[in-house]
Image (spheres, grey):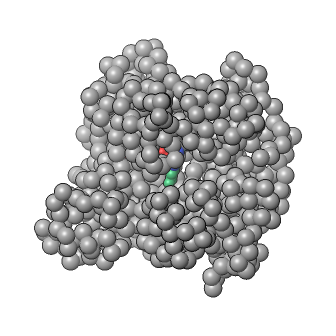
Amino acid sequence: MSAIRWRSRRGMLELDIVLARFLDRHEARLSEDETKAYLGLLEYPDAELWDIITGKGEPEAVEKALLELIRMN
Amino acid sequence: MERRKFDVAIIGAGGAGMRAALQLSSAGYKVAVLSKVFPTRSHTVAAQGGITAALGNVTEDNWLWHMYDTVKGSDYLGDQDAIEYMCRMGPQVVYEMEHFGLPFSRLENGKIYQRPFGGQSRNFGGDQAARTCAAADRTGHAMLHTLYQRNIQAKTHFFVEFLAIDLVRDAEGRALGVVALDMERGEPLLVEARATLLATGGAGRIFQASTNAFINTGDGLGMASRAGIPLEDMEFWQFHPTGVMGAGVLISEGVRGEGGYLVNGAGERFMERYAPHARDLAGRDVVARAIAIEIHEGRGCGSRKDHVLLKLDHIGKDEILDKLPGIREIALKFAHVDPLEAPIPVVPTAHYMMGGIPTHYRGQVVVPARTGPEEAVPGLYAIGECACVSVHGANRLGGNSLLDLLVFGQAAAEHIVEFLKENPTSPPIPREGPDLALARLARWERREGTERVADVYRDMQGIMQSHCGVFRRAEVLEEGIAKLEEARQRLDRAAIGDHSKVFNTARVEALELENLMEVAFATIRSAAARTESRGAHARDDYPERDDRNWLKHTLAHRDGTIDYKPVRLKPLTVSSFPPKTRTY
Ligand SMILES: Cc1cc2nc3c(=O)[nH]c(=O)nc-3n(C[C@H](O)[C@H](O)[C@H](O)COP(=O)(O)OP(=O)(O)OC[C@H]3O[C@@H](n4cnc5c(N)ncnc54)[C@H](O)[C@@H]3O)c2cc1C
């Protein structure tokens, strides 16, 4: 286990669920760059991260493909 | 073991912990705040509705009216000294947050915007009041960020991603600090302090269906309970009527406010039978119970008849998108339906814990002792959702929790300052002081086990959901206690597969489950013992409130015994609000 799992524990249940689903499906296959990008996304405050995931906001710089994967959960 | 020394150790960086920390750091004390997640990811961030205080910006208002509503809302189980204090202090703590920079929504005249919430009245039960202050739909988020920034300026020391394990006390019971696990390194840390404050939030994860984030595991209650402190009024849990079936995510009352309504398996708009006047907008406890009865009596929806439907497609696409932003995303993601076309499956979902660690209205923990039912524990404080002051009694009103965090965060800090002045030094930590905590950590090093933590976790939630949910009866509760006892024994036989040090989430989850188990037992035992219905505790076999026998607080001890103590019916300065039948 790792920091990536723990930092996916959030203050909003919505994020807990979406991020856990994402990790269950993709964690094993994330590249080093993707892991870094994901940890970067986790730095956003909950409310902003939720906006990003629901498409109401865009992060400053992140791999589009990774974001699309997260959004699908 | 590594040791650090502070004046005050605060466990929890939600609204409550950070409000207290700010006051103490600003007064020049050396304050440690421990949090298992980054402070601004505490559960307070999820609060959308707002914070209630009688500012009178939209409708004429008075803190005494707020007090009346809160006493009545509590179904007369709330302590009236604490309720008076909270409602009287309300405007002051809200203006303080405004001054700290919390970006409240504004009226045209520049004053703080206030919205009407259920249970708010003018003039002691008269017309609807608008009393809840909001920063758009992100009040909790704004509050946490404001408090965090201020704490950084005040030089509060944060220990982030530290999991508090157990309190450290001496033989006389005085609190001397806490042992925590540094999650990144996997090493324990002893935080020594002259005063210790628990602000660890709620424990909604004892139930299968919960609106609470995964971190709400009642750690502070577990720590208090293991330290021999009984838990107060644990039978009282507020169930929100509309959590998304299977996920728990909250669908706000706003949907019903805009015309959404509930239907059962026969397509009937059943709330008309339970509350002919208010219908789908009746109080949370009333609607939650109605849904539970529909499901229990076989009128639920779906192949398993285990939920009801919240219909809103008739409101119209434009209205939904305009007035209920966010609802569509939630329904699509968590219910896999598009609410513009189909209804959302919902169930009553555990939302807020009214009970907790017993304290007086200045935040100090009080326990029954030879001198009476409320003897203060020196150096130990609790505030926020983990505490039972008790201002919410048997049922919390919307927006009163965020208020509780600020008011009692401040009150506890003031009491701590007095305590520190009277106790300039603290007694040395006895050699065996950290043993309780270290034994808990060592227990999960064990490699042999026949049970998996995740299985016991899931089963505990299932037991609490079906035996101690909205629908409670003696046989159901007793059977639940027996099953829970079995689950606890299985937890004793469990082991984890991962023994690595760094960010070992398996170990963290095992430690959290031990805390949840304490909370679950206190809840179901207290619920089985209380043979009346009051507020959120609804007994099918004892449907009436019984003031002659039950106008008292429950105290559940760890050994399974239950005590009671009187409700404080006497406010601080005004006259008492005597119990009356609660009608809306
Ligand atoms: C979806 C939702 C919406 C809500 N909306 C409203 C609203 O609009 N208005 C309102 O008044 N109330 C609302 N509530 C209730 C309110 O949000 C909570 O009661 C309140 O935020 C709890 O605050 P707290 O400071 O007590 O705890 P939290 O904010 O939960 O913080 C607990 C802190 O303790 C820390 N912690 C816990 N255990 C440990 C440990 N073992 N070691 C170290 N740190 C630990 C956590 O990291 C966290 O920092 C809502 C609740 C929910 C679930």
Tally the marks: 0
**Can you say whether B285 is above or below B488 in the image?**
above
Q: Residue at x 78, y 56 (%)?
A: B277
- Of all residues, the one furthest to the right in this rendering is B548
- State the residue in front, B420 or B569: B569
> Residue A18 at x, y = what percent?
37, 68
- State the residue in front, B101 or B382: B101
Q: Residue at x 33, y 25 (%)?
A: B25
Viewer can see residue B523: no
> Residue B555 at x, y = what percent?
67, 42
- State the residue in front, B399 or B455: B399
> Residue B211 at x, y = what percent?
52, 59
Does B190 sit left or right of B410 as displayed?
Answer: left
Viewer can see residue B98: yes
The quarter of the picture where residue B52 lies is top right
Q: Residue at x 50, y 59 (%)?
A: B324
**Can you say whether A47 is above or below B500 in the image?**
above
- Of all residues, the one furthest to the left in this rendering is A33
Q: Residue at x 31, y 70 (%)?
A: A71
> Which quadrant: the N terminus of chain B?
top left
- State the residue in front, B431 or A22: A22
Does B64 sit left or right of B339 as displayed?
Answer: right
Does B52 sit left or right of A33 as displayed?
Answer: right
**Can you say whether B519 is above or below B150 in the image?**
below
> Residue B24 at x, y = what percent?
38, 24
